[in-house]
Image: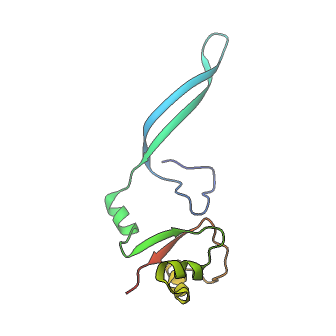
């Protein structure tokens, strides 16, 4: 299990379950007797997804979108559905009550329509 700090930042992929696929280490501080005291590590992980859980969480009827600065629910609806008045579909899919809520960095579920 890999986590990043005490609190998970909104919209991040932490924590996740994975395996170490690459590890390099470079010792850069030693005790007088030669024992290593400090090292720099470079680590690469590959995330493990349980196939059943992944299928349930990634419904093929949904896609996602990372909200960027300047995005609004209506502008996202305009991009996705070509109709900004359909913003309520996105709000309902994500349990949002306030369409003006600041969402930068949040990954929204975008439901498919008809």
> Residue extending furthest bottom?
85
State the residue at coordinates (66%, 77%).
Answer: 101
Tell which of 48 and 44 is nearer to you.
44
Rendered view: 16 above or below 73:
above
Residue at 51% over, 69% down: 65
Work out which quarter of the rendered image holds the C terminus and state it: bottom left
Q: Residue at x 52, y 53 (%)?
A: 15
Q: Is residue 6 above or below residue 90?
A: above
The colour scheme applied to this rendered structure is rainbow
Relative side of 52 to 38, left or right: left
- Give the percent coordinates (x, y) of residue 29: 65, 20
**In the image as oriented, which residue stretches furthest toward the top?**
33
Image vertical order of residue 85 relative to residue 58, above or below: below
Image location of residue 70, percent across then percent down: 66, 72
Residue 50: image location, x then y, percent: 35, 56
Image quarter of residue 28: top right
Residue at image point 58% right, 69% down: 67
Q: Position of residue 64 (x, y in %)?
A: 47, 70
Question: Which residue is nearer to you in this view: 9 or 77?
Answer: 77
**Marker count (numbered):** 0
């Amino acid at each position: 299990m890999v986590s990043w700090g005490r609190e998970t930042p909104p919209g991040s992929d932490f924590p996740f379950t994975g395996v170490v696929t690459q590890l390099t280490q470079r010792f850069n501080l030693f005790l007088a007797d030669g024992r290593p005291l400090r090292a720099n590590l470079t680590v690469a992980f590959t995330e493990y997804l349980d196939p059943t859980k992944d299928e349930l969480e990634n419904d093929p009827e949904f896609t996602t979108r990372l909200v960027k600065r300047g995005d609004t629910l209506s502008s996202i609806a305009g991009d996705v559905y070509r109709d900004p008045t359909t913003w309520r579909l996105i709000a309902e899919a994500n349990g949002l009550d306030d369409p003006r809520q600041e969402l930068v960095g949040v990954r929204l579920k975008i439901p498919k329509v008809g």
